[in-house]
Image (tube, rainbow, N blue to C red):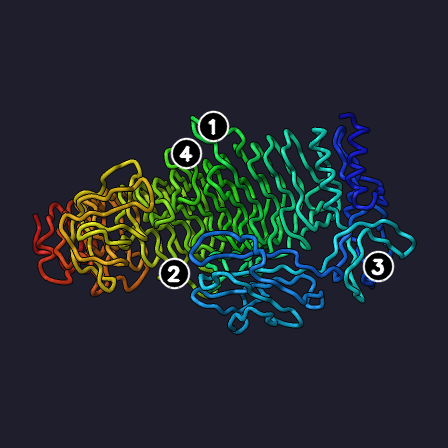
Amino acid sequence: MNLRISTVLCSVAAIAWGGWAMAAEPADSAPAGWLNARECGASGSEFSTTAPTEKGSKTITVAEAGDFQAGQGVMLSQCNPRVAGKAIWGPRHVVVMGRPLDDKVEIRGYDGTQGDWVVLLLDVPEGSKSFCWSEDLARTWSETVPITGDWQPLRDGIEVRFNEHDWEKGYTVHFSLRGQLVTAIEKVEGKAITLRDAPTRTSPAATLRHCDDAALQAAIDRAVREKRNLHVPVGRYRLSRGLYVRNATAMTIEGAGAVDTILDISEGEGGCISLSKGVEVTVRNFTMVGHSGFAERDQCGLLRTRGSSYFWGFGAKGCNAVSIGSTERVLIENCHGRRMATECFVSGSTSRGTVEKPNESHSKQTTYLRCSAIDCGRNGFNDVMCGSENTSVLYCRIVDVGGCAWEGASRFVRFIGNYVRNAGTVAMGNLGPANHDATFPELGAGQHIVADNVFESNVPYGGCAIRAAVGATQVLVRDNLFVNFGSSAVNISGKSDLTHYPSANATISGNLFDMTEIGEKSSPRIAVDVSAPDVIVGNNQIYVRGDCDPQVTAIKVEEPAVHLNIHDNLIRNCGAGIVTSRASSRVGEVVDGRTFTLSTRTVPLDHRAADQCRGWGLVWLAGGRPAALSAIEAIAGAETTDKVRVTLQEPYTAKAGDGFELIPTAANWVFRGNTVSGCRRPIVLDSYGGPSSIVRANIVTRGGTPDVKQAIEMRGRFDLIGNHVAGFDEAGSAALRLFPDPLSRTAGGLVADNVFQSCAQVVSESQEGLWQAIHAKENVYIECGSTPVKQQ
């Protein structure tokens, strides 16, 4: 196709909006061979004016004609009342996005006087035939009233009518009501402007703005056809809907400069730029502005409704900066999203397929370079599906983001060199039966490298800065800085359930955790929290500047995670230094006297192994406390989440919902070479433990922190070998304080080759006989007030 024919086609696309004319100012020059967006009629003008409108009249008289020209797209407020969108969400307990409403609910009476953009939610609680409604995305609700099947008033003339449906199952309905008219200019005569479409409402003072989405879409389509790059000059390009790049083979869309080339979708919905399939696309040098910022984060996220249990506010009023759908290679560079309601930068892709049925058309490499997501209602960056591969978020800035800083179920992700402040979790995983592909679990998913980032202040969403969970495997968290951190930092979670896969295999190393709270109030938080198996935590610094902060726990690990190595960490001035604890699981359905399924669980299972956990202990809980002990014959069915079955060696009367804890036969826990100083509770061993749970060659000192009751608190079976414990010289303090295990049993263990120095008391027992059960030998006591009787 030659250039002249392509130019004519672009002109025809613009004429469909009423003809087009060049902008008043000369078009910014584009690089040689590039298409200039101005050639297709894009104005990039911020000018706006007001005009009264008359229903049915295409001609309006504006206060100022400004730079409006025939052929340009425009948006006119308050003059075209209509239902712009509607959907039904539910039934309750079903994870499903909004579906077509059809005629299940009708609405009438919206005439534009109630607002130019009104989002209504109708909520029908499960188990009822009544409803309440909200127009501020669930911040406030009306009173609940019965559904009558007739027209029922909401406010100011708006009425709804519910028709026959299984409403008692719990549903939520949304309507998007708009007064905006999107049209084009046919003629300009002084202050008289003739529009392509007539307003449907008389308004005394409508606002007329430029609208460039039709012209920009024509430019993109032409550039794709001609296999050319697209230059977008400096300007503010208002969008009523998103722009699409479909099936591009090799294309760059580039703004003249990120500061002054703005795509503004604050009056519309969709992605500023959405990529659909194709081979290679680069987008660079834009600022993209939406309509919902950090202050609206509660309205963009998961809404608390009594109908649907899965209603996300952005589903009713959403916008993205960039959306990617299965494009093979993508570079997003120097693009900056602001006030995005949905994920600011988001990708979803089909997967590579299997050896038998390969799929070449999937996201193979996506790079976000020097971008930013600031003041956004939901996520900064997101890979929704596990099919995307090799996504890199590099040297980006994520600040004031109401959802996750990053959320990824995809493979081989690099989150490197970014700055994150007052933003949600870097979340890895989110895999389960509803989000996986044919290669899972053999190929795995959720593999991440999170490195060289700076995390400052706190986390407003998600509970911690970094989390690997529900399906994430092979995760590296290394060489990150946490500055004045007032929230939990890293969580490697082993929890799963019927709809999510378990996680495993992570290394947390070389990080500096400054957990100092500089705000008015310190909150409970954990620097490193581990409940997944096969994890190394090593060579980190975790500290609080100044006095000890009792709200901070440096490192916490939970049974029954296995194969944990906690080594060479430097911990100072934390409320708790190294803590072990116990995670519980729950019975799903009881099959027979010895067999039951699992609901929520923290069980380290390998999907490739047939029968697992043979001989493990299972501790039944009553009121949250250990009450009885069973033994496991085997756990089978780990290849799926919903077929896992536990078989006991002996019958036990259990019921659905009963809680229990697991005791591995060999946990393979090692705590070695750590330095713990100035902590109120330096080492707390509150797990069942076992013969392969070893605390070796650690240095534990009181430092300047007062009122420290003990250096090491042991409530299970652990071996203490070659540790140096010093300075616990306050009255009533002990180097080692012994307790029975959670089942009130004498735990035993080995205490050997340790040095206890300047301690008021070496061993304290909560009951007699605990020290006698310890195998103690070759320990050294220097300048200690009270030493144990038994020495071997």
**Looking at the picture, how far across and down is residue 46, in whole percent?**
77, 52
Q: Amino acid at mark 3?
A: Ser
Of marks 4 and 2, which one's residue comes earlier in the chain?
4
* Crowd class of label 3 (few under 14; some 14 to 19; many from 20; radius 10 Å): some
**Looking at the picture, how far across and down is residue 673, in whole percent?**
28, 43
What element does badge 3 sit on?
loop
User: Separation of disc 3 and disc 1 at Cα?
Assistant: 57 Å
- State the residue position of label 1: 358
Of marks 3 and 2, which one's residue comes earlier in the chain?
3
**Looking at the picture, how far across and down is residue 569, in whole percent?**
33, 45
User: Separation of disc 2 and disc 1 at Cα?
Assistant: 48 Å
Q: What label sits on residue 524 in the rendered view? A: 2
What element does badge 4 sit on?
loop
- State the residue position of label 3: 57
Query: Within the image, what quadrant is residue 582 found in?
Result: bottom left
- State the residue position of label 4: 439
